[in-house]
Amino acid sequence: MEQGLRERKKQATRQALALAALRLTVERGFDGVLVEDIAAEVGVSPRTFNNYFSSKAEAICALAVDRAQRAGAALRARPPSEPLREAISATVLAELAGGAVPEHVPDRVWFDGLRMVLATPAMQGEYLRVRAAMQDALSSAIAARLSTPPGSLLPEVVGGAVATACDAATHRWLHSDPPVPLRSLLEEALGHLAEY
């Protein structure tokens, strides 16, 4: 179902606020940016900002939460006949490696923003929320693909393992010297899951 104009405008405003929050925080540091700065950057009021986000930290991580939701939707959309392991790998590689940086976000801002989130104590709770969003999105899609009975732990265990593999690959990518492509790290991490 196609979104109406109003919904598209709301989504565009939300994305603009999230990108401004991420970019300004990378430029000035977490403590150097106020909600008022983010709102002014987008040309809206702080009250409008608060209609979309409960905090600066939530806005900074919003693009990653959106990516997690897209990953879940993409996994649901994979062909039902495709084996689960292949569907998960294809989804993760397309959404995280192919789309590691959302198309409207400059590469350096995304990379530096992710490093900043992981290094800033005030952001770590929000980072855990992003990780939980990824696990929930994947677990829900896995449950739908497998038609597991209610209460089965299998989708959550597999979703958690995949989210952890993605985390491990991302951490290695951020700190590798010399740089290593995220795709190869994700392939390696997902390959380890298949060994057990």
Image (cartoon, helix red, strand yellow):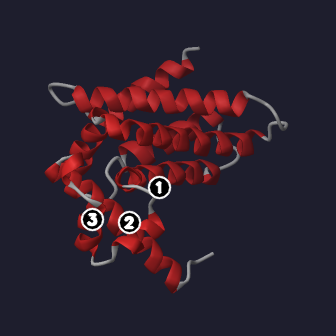
Residue 41 left/right relative to 171: left
**Of label 3 and label 2, which has the lower sequence position?**
2
| Residues at marks 1 and 3, CA–CA distance in whole angstroms | 19 Å
Residue at x-position 27% and y-position 33%? 119
**Of label 2 and label 1, which has the lower sequence position?**
2
Residue 132 in the image, given as x and y percentages of width and height: 54, 39
Quadrant holding the N terminus: bottom right
Asked whether disc 2 touches disc 1, contact meaning CB atoms under 8 Å apart, the reply is yes
Quadrant holding the C terminus: top right
Asked whether the viewer can see residue 107, the reply is: no
Q: Quadrant of residue 56?
A: bottom left
Q: Quadrant of residue 151?
A: top right
Q: Which residue is mark 2?
A: 15
Point out the frontmost of discs 3 and 2.
3
Residue at x-position 27% and y-position 54%? 22
Label 2: element kind: helix
For badge 3, the amino acid type reads Ile
186 or 36, nearer to the observer: 36
On screen, residue 54 above or below 8: above
Residue 161 in the image, given as x and y percentages of width and height: 56, 26
Mark seen at residue 66:
1
Q: Which residue is mark 3?
A: 38
109 or 37, nearer to the observer: 37
| Residues at marks 3 and 2, CA–CA distance in whole angstroms | 12 Å
Q: Give the class, few, some or many, for how many residues have Cα within 10 Å of label 2's Cα (few <14, many ≥20).
A: some
